[in-house]
Image (cartoon, helix red, strand yellow):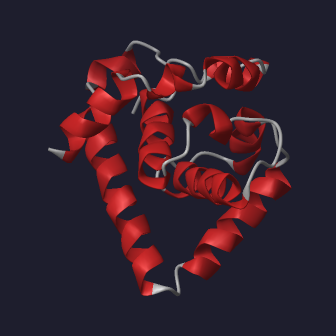
Amino acid sequence: MLLRRTWMHMRGADWSQNASVSRQGFGESMQASFVGDLAVAGILSLVARERRVPVGLLLHKSRCAADVAEARQLAMYLMHVVLQRPMTEIGAFFGRDRTTVSHACHCVEDKRDDAAFDSEVIRLEAAIDEITGSLPKWLARAGVAHAA
C-alpha cells in the first residue's frame, strides 16, 4: 500500500505544484542527470510528502525555511545511507558542496537520538527499500542511471 501511494505521489501534482521553483531547481546539469533516476525521485517525493514540503523547495538553491532545510537534510541522508551514493554526487545534485551533505548526515544522525524521529527515519528507509527493490532489474541492465 505504501509503495502504491508513493508511486502515485511521484506521478501526481506535487512535482508541478511549484513549477517555477522546480524549473529553477532542475536548472543544474547534475540534476538533469538524475531526472531518470527513479530511486532518487522516490526519495524526493517521499520526503516531500512526509514533511509536507514541495519537491521544488527541496531542490531550491537557497536555504529556505528551517522545515525545508531539515527535509532537504533528511533527503540527503537517505540518498547517502540507503542508496549509498557518494556525498560529492549528492552535493552536486542539490547544488551544494560535499561538506554540506556531510553536515546534513551528521545532523540527521544526531536527531536519531529522539525516538520519534528515529522511527520516522526507519519507516522512510523501509519505504525506500520497498521502492528500490521493486524496480525492474532490466532498468539497471539497460543503462538507466542509478536505477536500482
Residue at horizontal 34 percent and vertical 32 percent from the top: 9
Q: Is residue 94 left or right of residue 37?
A: right
* Residue drawn at x 75%, y 61% as measured from the top left: 102
* Residue beneath the point at 68% across and 72% down: 107
Closer to us: 106 or 21: 21
Query: Which residue is nearer to you in this view: 93 or 138?
Result: 93
Quadrant of image for the C terminus: top left
Drawn side of residue 1 relative to residue 116, left or right: left
Would you say residue 93 is visible in this rendering?
A: yes
Q: Quadrant of the N terminus?
A: top left
What x and y, as percent, mark residue 26? 69, 21
Which residue is drawn at the image coordinates 73% and 38% (left, top)? 94
Report x, y in % for residue 42: 42, 36
Could you tell me residue 98's position as x and y percent? 81, 50
Q: Position of residue 118 (x, y in %)?
A: 44, 76
Image quadrant in which you'd find residue 90: top right
In the rendered view, would you say 82 is above or below 103?
above
